[in-house]
Amino acid sequence: MKQDETTRAEKFVVRFPPGMRDRIAQAATHSHRSMNAEIVARLQRSMVEWPGDLPRAEGCVPQGLEEGLLLDCFRRLPAEKRQALLALLV
């Protein structure tokens, strides 16, 4: 069965300057995600913050990124604040 192009992830090789791989690994561990997920989350966030060429309403997040941004913020919370937030949602 052939995988649909819209669901296939693209691969791209990146060369990091000395020490950056270790910093990414530390950030990924802190955020409780893989290095790949950490890099993708940071790139997505930078693209949201970057003005770019597309018109966008002020403060508006491109569709599809809201969940990722919320999850990123949640993961950065200290454990006790994550637990308190989860208790409010239950």
Image (cartoon, rainbow, N blue to C red):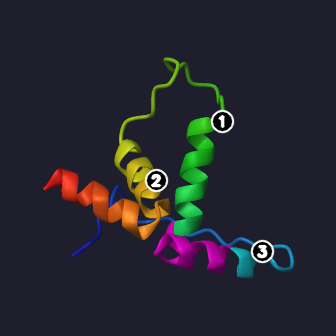
| Label 2 element class | helix
| Magenta stretch contains residue 74 | no
Snapshot quadrant of residue 22: bottom right
Q: Along the horizontal axis of the image, is 69 left or right of 2?
A: right
Which numbered disc, 2 or 1, marks the residue closer to the eye?
2
Q: Could you tell me how far apart the alpha carbons at marks 3 and 1 are, in whole angstroms?
A: 22 Å
Find disc 2 in the rendering and name its residue.
Answer: 73
Q: Residue at x 49, y 77 (%)?
A: 34
Question: Residue 19 got which mark?
Answer: none
Front-lying residue, 87 or 57 = 87
Q: Amino acid at mark 1?
A: Trp
Residue drawn at point x = 29 percent, y = 55 percent: 85
Q: In the rendered image of this protein, does residue 79 appear above or below residue 89?
A: below
Distance between mark 2 and mark 1 Cα atoms = 18 Å
Give the x, y percent position of residue 14.
71, 71
Q: Which residues are magenta?
A: 24-37
Question: Is residue 28 highlighted in magenta?
Answer: yes
- Relative vertical location of residue 73 with respect to residue 21 in this rendering, above or below: above
Q: Secondary structure at mark 3?
A: helix
* Residue at 50%, 65% in the rendered image: 10
Task: Return the disc, 3 or 1, that comes first in the chain's sequence.
Answer: 3
Q: Is residue 31 left or right of residue 14?
A: left
What residue is disc 3 on?
A: 20
Q: Amino acid at mark 3?
A: Met
Q: Which residue is mark 1?
A: 50
Magenta highlight: main SS: helix
